[in-house]
Image (spheres, helix red, strand yellow):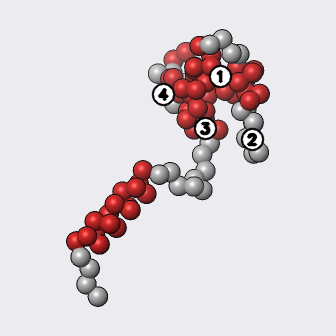
Amino acid sequence: MRYTNDDYKLLKANLDRLLEEEPEDERITKQQMVQKLASGIAALRKKGHRFEKIAARLVIPNFKITPGTMRSCLRREKRGGRRQPGVPAAAAP
């Protein structure tokens, strides 16, 4: 069977749309979850909400975060990643 250029364009458009979507079953770490939520957390902090209150609202099945872990994830995000092993925090880039 032969296909037309229109068939190709339809298939290409479907692939392009799929590229824009995130896989449904993708597993992400707690750090990645906080990174994705960082702008919302920052907006709440700017309004005066405490980390404790924000963390209390960020509870779903299989996900719970403490205020300290949230702070640590956000600091790490701001710094650009994890500290290198064996390098003191003050000396880390």
Asked if disc 3 and disc 4 are in contact, CB closer than 8 Å, the reply is: no
Which of disc 4 and disc 3 is earlier in sequence? 3
Q: Is residue 88 visible?
A: no
Asked if disc 1 and disc 2 are in contact, CB closer than 8 Å, the reply is: no
Which of 34/5 is in front?
5
Q: Determine the CA span between mark 2 and mark 4.
A: 27 Å
Which of disc 2 and disc 1 is earlier in sequence? 2
Instruction: Report x, y in % for residue 37.
Output: 58, 32
Q: From the image, tell me which residue sits under label 2.
A: 60
Q: From the image, tell me which residue sits under label 4.
A: 80
Asked if disc 3 and disc 1 are in contact, CB closer than 8 Å, the reply is: no
Q: Determine the CA span between mark 4 and mark 1.
A: 14 Å
Considering only vertical position in the picture, is 53 above or below 23? Answer: above
* Quadrant showing the N terminus: bottom left
Q: Determine the CA span between mark 1 and mark 2.
A: 19 Å
Q: Determine the CA span between mark 3 and mark 1.
A: 13 Å
